[in-house]
Image: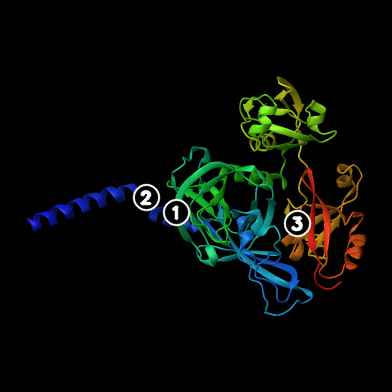
Amino acid sequence: MIKKLIAVSALLVSFAGTAFSKDLPDFTELAEKQGASVVNISVTQVVQGNANGSAFPGMPDDEALGELFRRFGIPNMPGAPGGQAPQQEFKSQSLGSGFIISADGYILTNAHVVKDADEVIVKLYDKREFKAKIIGFDRRTDVALIKIEANGLPKVTTGDPSQLKVGEWVAAIGSPFGLENTVTAGIVSAKGRALPQENFVPFIQTDVAINPGNSGGPLFNLRGEVVGINSQIYSRSGGYMGLSFAIPIDVALEISNQLKSSGKITRGWLGIGIQELTKELAESFGMKNTNGALVAGVEKGGPADKGGLEAGDVILKFDGKPILTSSDLPRAVAATKPNKEIPVEVLRKGATRTLSITIGEMPADKDEVASNKGMPKPEANRIGLMLKDLTPQQKKKLNGKNGLLVMDAQGAAAQAGLRRGDIVLGMNNSEAINVDQFNKQLATVASGKTVALLVLRGENTLYVPVKVNGNK
């Protein structure tokens, strides 16, 4: 009797194992066929910092900042324990991933992997190494296109991200912590995710294990097609915690095609500031739901202003397509060709109306194209800000006001939350006229004191307190 029970139990376990194995995907074929099209990217950058600098320059050791969405590479910073030291130049190295999209050497990766690089080295699956040229990059979508001089390379096959289903199996291949051609797998957790400060990308969220060094690598579906570029993780520690985000491949290819053909990105532009429509705001507008994008501000003389759009309008439809959340609008506008006339349905004072607006062209980021790479980089001041005087065109957008463009932020400035693209309008209620005047004023501040910087970020101004340390 006991022997019969054991036999039945073994049979049930066998059946259960067979059924279970059928439900689990096999990634061996994908790894074998696609691994050769994935590359390792090594980036060298000349930076300024303290000789005893942290492994993450400009970042504090406080793990609480890990709550932020972190773009990732692997800094390899020289240093030794000790006190505060003068800033000096040294080389920083970081690693990322990428994948070949054409047999003649075009490679896709993340913009944040290569945008500050002084040298980019690509290592192939067969261990050959090539110095890469940066064709261009787009900071807004975090997509970069680079090129190596080689032919007959194995390239990826791209898929359709719109066909992805939540719960579907996907796999990533990359170089986490420099470990080349590492395969990790998981499922699609969500689609169309809107992340803070990332208005132009409907991210694919997965639970695929992504770590520093995976950045820029491909995300595959089970058919071996690339459906995304692994770009960001959400983490308390900087490492994998089950939340990974990929740029849909169709978005990336559109960017790479523009970079390849013209060296720049052209996007539609309305010239408005928007915000999410909360339940309370919707009720105040007499709306039954929170669908739409609330116009918080309209740039004078911009396309929206010329088309009759007003602050307080709720945009319900753009070019006939419903706007369900505020994040839907920037993507729809950016995808529209400039100079095209578009119907925009809005809710204004309880009544709907349709405006006809001619879309403008979004001003390009100065660091969007690699041709700017040769320009000399300003030195960091004593709080870690690399500043540049505004051009007359940039001042015009500020109605003639002065300001300083933040080219980069390190040290105390980065810890305080300042970042590239911010415009410093003043310090301690004094106007920021030019870089020399600002740095001279900063030199008079005693070490350990805190200065209040008035900063313009997008459409909003805010005061940012920064503690001044180091030598005057």
Amino acid type assigned to the residue bearing label 1 in the image: Ala
Note whether 152 is above or below 384 in the view shown: above
Quadrant placement of the N terminus: bottom left
- The residue under the point 86% across, 42% down is 397
Q: List the residue tagged with mark 3.
A: 418
Name the mark on residue 185. Answer: 1
Name the mark on residue 344. Answer: none
Q: Earlier in the sequence, mark 3 or mark 1?
A: 1
C-alpha span from label 3 to label 1: 35 Å
Amino acid type assigned to the residue bearing label 2 in the image: Pro
Visible residue check, residue 247:
yes
| SS at circle 3 | loop
Amino acid type assigned to the residue bearing label 3 in the image: Leu
Q: Are marks 1 and 2 in contact (CB under 8 Å)?
A: yes
Residue 190 percent across, percent down from the top left: 51, 43
Q: List the residue tagged with mark 2.
A: 25
Q: Earlier in the sequence, mark 1 or mark 2?
A: 2
